[in-house]
Image (spheres, rainbow, N blue to C red):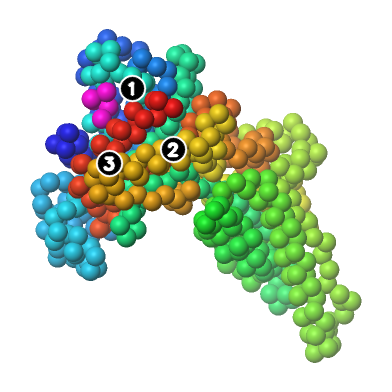
Amino acid sequence: MEERILEILKTLVAMKSVSCSEAEKEPAQWFADFFKEMPYFKAHPEDTGLYEIPGDPYGRKIPYGFLKGKKTDTILMSGHFDVVSTEEYGKAEPWAYEVGTGKLEEMLAQMPLGEQERADLESGEWIWGRGVADMKGGLAIHAALFEQYAKQAQEGTLEGSIMFMPVPDEESYSAGMRNGINILKKFKEKYGLNYKLLIDPEPTADKGELQIMSLGTVGKVMPAIIVQGKKGHMGHCYEGFSALGILADIYLRTNGSLEFSEVYGDEASVPPTWGNMRDMKKVYDVSIPHRAYGYFTALNFGMTPEEILGKLKRICTEAFENQVEKLNNEYQKYKTMNKAEVMDRIHYEPCVMSFNELCDAAKKKDAEAFDRFYREAYDRIIAKVNTGESNFPSATIDMMEAVLDFADIQYPVTIIGFAPPYYPPTHSDQVKGKEGYGTKAYELVSNLSEKEYGQKVGFENFFMGISDLSYGCITSPFDYVKYSANTPLWGDDYNMDFAAIEEVAIPGVIYGPIGRNYHQYIERVNKDSLLRVVPNVTKALIEYMWTL
């Protein structure tokens, strides 16, 4: 088993499957061939294949293999085979994708390393390279286990059923898992499957003596905001109203705000962090910024997009009113200093709209013309995403601005929408009809890992790194129609089948080999965890879950 895991890991790491590139097709094809070569699938070719992601700009596909056991109780093994790029490796970059040659370790020894990293390098207890931890190590474990179970299925001795579905594009927009839910739904309907557990072998952190297992995953919502003020010459600044001032006020009221943090047990979701904020001037001129935009990430345990939108509407209104009051107070003082000022006061009525409300206002002008305009604008803007000229958050802003232009609103206004990708929060204890499955999985893993292998295991309720567990089940229901209506890019190129996710309803946990510093040139995975502890404990977990 250890030799096979290492062999598969070397093969997978050698594939430079950087996210959002055609290179992701190579591991997909490797897994497809991996399945086809098994005697079980020669007898059951209909239960394996390559699912083509509809309209994917890189032609990516999802490989899958299903082993039908004595029971319809099914375990899903999954994980992503895309990786982040390697430019941070510097002079060691040519060897970033090599496992086992020793050349990468030789190069790293000459590079700046912290005390912990150098100790790990000199210990010989870690495997280094891009993707060894995040997350081809976990996939190698699952592939090796799947081979064993395929032999049992061929012999007719497999107790439960197993689906193995490695996916592309977890590091960017999760197109793999979002579309993979269609495969799971198809097999559920075909065989009447009861999905018991999704095991996602993301690398797990070690905190002191503890290896951490995640029973759920945090949700992610990305609000996108456009503020329109009033244009004016900077030499007559009180005749205008800066969009930047309003947006900056919104930023100060939201960035790091604990109002958006939620508590679950002794864990709390991280407060919002803004990823972008700037004016929308195309060229330099001496005028007050007419428009400004920004977007931020809000992580949540159960707060719905609608609740987040409600909070933002109130905050944006307060920011608007505060900036109007501030501008007027400054003007009143300035008026005593400059005889040319004759305005009585400065006042603007606050106006805050959701993107859907903006669309409704635009439709009132000419519904037929708006529908035609929207389709053309969507196709034009999404094409830039598909060619790499833009990304989902930036394209969202472009779409919001296009609709704002069409609506021809001339007064100050704030527009709020949502940018992809969206990740619903999930917890494996909260799936209807399967309550407590995550805790039961944890108890089995914790007891066996410590007793048999000396590795203590702790847990966290929510994985804060954001993961594909989000698309296995929905444990915090929300209004799907309202969310999609407020997401400008919702359509053929970005969507998810919420009904299918609810139908599959599979609790998920994150349990993979101990890794450190993923996405960095010091990414590594622990050999003992990868080759001995996690494979054996995962096998026991699979077989235990079949009995529930």
Task: Between residue 361 and residue 25, name the one nearer to us.
Answer: 25
Q: Three-letter amino acid code at disc 3?
A: Val
Q: Which residue is drawn at 58% across and 27% down?
A: 499
- Whether the magenta-drawn stretch holds residue 444 is answered as no
Residue 135, image x and y in percent? 31, 43
Residue 116 shows in this picture: yes
Front position among marks 2 and 3: 2
x, y percent for residue 51: 39, 24
Q: Which mark's residue is nearer the viewer, 3 or 1? A: 3
Q: In the rendered image, which residue does mark 3 sit on?
A: 534
Please report whichever mark, 2 or 3, sits nearer to the chain's N-terminal start: 2
Position of 276 relative to 531 (above/below): below
* Residue carrying label 2: 440
For the residue carrying disc 3, how many other residues have a C-alpha within 10 Å: few (<14), some (14-19), or many (20+)?
many
In the depicted structure, whether residue 45 falls above or below residue 421: above
Residue visible at 79% across and 73% down?
325
Camera-side residue: 241 or 93? Answer: 93
Is 308 on the left-hand or right-hand side of 337?
A: left
Select label 2 or label 1 by which is in front. Answer: 2
Q: What are the residue bounds of the magenta stretch?
A: 145-149
